[in-house]
Amino acid sequence: MLAVALAQGTLPPFLPCELQPHGLVNCNWLFLKSVPHFSAAAPRDNVTSLSLLSNRIHHLHDSDFAQLSNLQKLNLKWNCPPAGLSPMHFPCHMTIEPNTFLAVPTLEELNLSYNGITTVPALPSSLVSLILSRTNILQLDPTSLTGLHALRFLYMDGNCYYKNPCGRALEVAPGALLGLGNLTHLSLKYNNLTTVPRSLPPSLEYLLLSYNHIVTLAPEDLANLTALRVLDVGGNCRRCDHARNPCVECPHKFPQLHSDTFSHLSRLEGLVLKDSSLYQLNPRWFRGLGNLTVLDLSENFLYDCITKTKAFQGLAQLRRLNLSFNYHKKVSFAHLTLAPSFGSLLSLQELDMHGIFFRSLSQKTLQPLARLPMLQRLYLQMNFINQAQLGIFKDFPGLRYIDLSDNRISGAVEPVATTGEVDGGKKVWLTSRDLTPGPLDTPSSEDFMPSCKNLSFTLDLSRNNLVTVQPEMFAQLSRLQCLRLSHNSISQAVNGSQFVPLTSLQVLDLSHNKLDLYHGRSFTELPRLEALDLSYNSQPFSMRGVGHNLSFVAQLPTLRYLSLAHNGIHSRVSQQLCSTSLWALDFSGNSLSQMWAEGDLYLRFFQGLRSLIRLDLSQNRLHTLLPCTLGNLPKSLQLLRLRNNYLAFFNWSSLTLLPNLETLDLAGNQLKALSNGSLPSGTQLQRLDVSRNSIIFVVPGFFALATRLRELNLSANALRTVEPSWFGFLAGSLEVLDVSANPLHCACGAAFVDFLLQVQAAVPGLPSRVKCGSPGQLQGRSIFAQDLRLCLDESLSWDCFGLSLLVVALGLAMPMLHHLCGWDLWYCFHLGLAWLPRRGWQRGADALSYDAFVVFDKAQSAVADWVYNELRVRLEERRGRRALRLCLEERDWLPGKTLFENLWASVYSSRKMLFVLAHTDQVSGLLRASFLLAQQRLLEDRKDVVVLVILSPDARRSRYVRLRQRLCRQSVLFWPHQPSGQRSFWAQLGMALTRDNRHFYNQNFCRGPTMAE
């Protein structure tokens, strides 16, 4: 089937990769060991971007990219990382052949970062952007980047630092980059540089040299870089008490910045001097920087300087200033007063002052900022502020965002006089534990709670020490539109008086507190409130016997968004929520299963929300959802979330009770099958998510009647196939069909492959994320990785299975039978062999008179006695109907004939000649003559008729006997010493006398005598 699909061109064209919009072929995270060569049927000329991020490609060949004639962007990041950056610290070296990239003359962007390369490979002249970060390249000379006249962006960060150690510094030879006449962006961060590279191209606009060891800067270091717009030299002389990674303390009396270092950089717009151990700011550093808009001075020692510096007087164009973490080691100050020169920053829009550590925020603190008409964002978090006069922000009409989170504000304070000095009050010594930032709040989905980014005034007081909220805190803040009070310890009963001054408030976040919702007029003092977050206030709801009043919702006429999530609400609450304005309600993380188990008490809990559009009932421990329950949900619902419950059954026909429902989310439940009915006809459902269930079966036609369905998520279930019969005519209308993370059975002729190829535009990650779950050899591989050699006929497969099972059974039975009854089987086998030829000989009994002519030395009485009384009796009298006819000299020779005539007749009238010998070293007389006649018969008739019986096995054996043992072992028999072996001897002798000696010859040495033609 794959071969047919390939011939018809229906397979995804860039297997195993995925074609994405704008000509991007995504091959990320496929564990490829070589660059894939796409088929000629693929539209390779349309490929402009190829991403091979995070694979295992260690060798790049000249022809790897030659087929992509219009390739412009190539990402080879994280294929062969250096030892220090490898998760297992294994060394890796990437080999790049000389013409690998030269074969792509259209290439403009190349990312070779995080690869073990030691030299810059040959590159095409069309290259515009080159990333060589986190490699092993430690030297740049004028020949390294020859011919790259179009190059504008060069990044070589982290080629020699603590994670990628090299024991030296990156060497940039003077003038090594001077030939790059169009270079505008150069980044050499984390390379152990001690000086600014010499003779950099004057076209540079962005120069990033942070986190090296450049502790001295003079005008000549940046002499010809007059076009610079951004300069980053931070982290070169660090303050290690605030370092988050290995740090080397800044030497004493360093860094040394010449007064005129930046004076000639008149076009400079951004300057980064962070983490540079600066104690003072020299106003001359900023002289001539009239276009400077961004200045980063964070993580220095400017706690005293910012109270009296004049360095900001000439920075009228500055828009963003970062002074964060300019604290005194282990000290927090009582007060902070900014220097008057801050008032000169007339264009300042954003000021970051978190982590300076002062305990009181008053009007004096920010007085110079009140004259800044464009100031919009002020960051004061993590300062250990415990007293804050929030009313001072009335004097900042342009402020849109104030961040006072992660402080210790506990309530309203009265205005107090300050000394105006940074250390004008008592110093408090801090431990290192106090300097650790708290966890960031996780943003919620804007479907259920809007953000404040578009509002005109936001105040963030989250993660403070508030226990109660008093209206005095927000006096003169009537224009405040968004207030965040999450992660405090507010445990009061809100009664409608706490937020009286906030007449313009639209969004109120009170999550992660301990609010007591008892009063029916809670929050009614907020006439414009649109969004209220009361999630994670579970402590009052966990108190046994305490009632909770949610009737206040009906008193909020403009409320649009309400979150009561993760409160553990289960009993003793209002029987019904009522609101004509509410659009979205997040009720996840409660216990509706317990509420709805109380008969009809809470059956209509949501029915009073007449305008509700979105409802989240996730994590409510629901095991079933009855039609009467769905029927009492608001008819206006368009989105219903039921994620992460315990639903093993869903009555799909009850969706008719929600006529406007467009999105249904049932992910993370326990559905086993979609079999009870189907999606009802006429439903408005457009998006259905049943991912992360245990669905193993879908009834045919289940989705067919939902004609408006456009997005379907069936991922992470237990489906072994995807049948077109599930969808009917709907399949062609689907925009998204996610079937990833299912254990699909990739049998030969699987119909789901054809179906997915037909709708492949709607299947996200079809080439790489849709994988086989069986058979075992394909588990975890793409459904298109199937080996056609595995596609065998099913009946033949069963036959092979049966045959292999039989072989295994015999292989196990044979050793066991041999161990238990080996001797019996051997005896029966040889007895049968001796019997079969005898029956054949009896059919031709007229041919020869005797079965064997017994030859022995009559002079040896012991031998004669054994022949007459043992051999004769055994072979003639005790074998029954299988008795042999022996020819004996004294009994069967005819009187009157000569000795030779009788001997001749006996030899040629017998099938075999049985020589009974006591020893083999000396043979004469009749024995010798008989043996010579046997040899003559061998030459004439080509029949070997000799059988030797040696009665003394210990006697010395002649060379003839030893040779015959080697060639025809079964024709040489020895009389056993032990009586237990005599039965075997007689059986072997009977077989030797009844079968042709040709069957006994060792084929490794001789084929035996052949029959005469």
Image (spheres, rainbow, N blue to C red):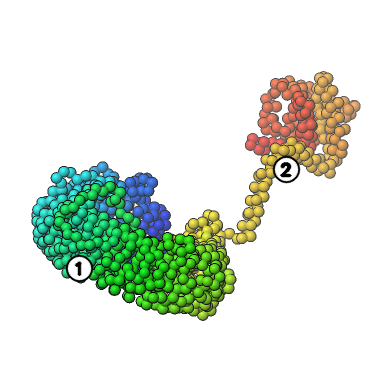
Estimate the x, y position of residue 183 in percent, counting from the top left: 20, 59
Question: Which residue carries the number 2 mark?
Answer: 1013
Q: Regarding mark 1 in the picture, which secondary structure is present there?
A: loop
Q: CA distance from mark 1 to mark 2?
A: 126 Å
Q: Quadrant of the C terminus?
A: top right
State which quadrant residue 517 falls in.
Answer: bottom left
Left or right for 533, reference 180: right
**Eye-nearest disc, 1 or 2:** 1
Does residue 1011 appear anywhere in the picture? yes
Name the outermost residue toward the right: 895
Establish if 87 lies above or below 789: above
Does residue 294 appear anywhere in the picture? no
Estimate the x, y position of residue 31 in percent, counting from the top left: 42, 55
Q: Say which residue appears at 28% left-offset and 53% top-offset.
A: 133
Establish if 707 lies above or below 300: below
Q: Say which residue appears at 76% left-offset and 37% top-offset.
A: 824
Question: Which residue carries the number 1 mark?
Answer: 396
Q: Amino acid at mark 2?
A: Glu
Left or right for 429, reference 443: left
Q: Say which residue appears at 16% left-offset and 43% top-offset.
A: 252
* Tag 1–tag 2 contact (CB < 8 Å): no
**Label 2 neighbourhood size at 10 Å, few (<14), some (14-19), many (20+)?**
few
Q: Earlier in the sequence, mark 1 or mark 2?
A: 1
**For this rendering, which residue is in front, 839 or 422?**
422
**For this rendering, which residue is in front, 659 or 923?**
659
Q: How many marks?
A: 2
Q: Amino acid at mark 1?
A: Phe
Establish if 263 lies above or below 726: above
State which quadrant residue 366 falls in.
Answer: bottom left
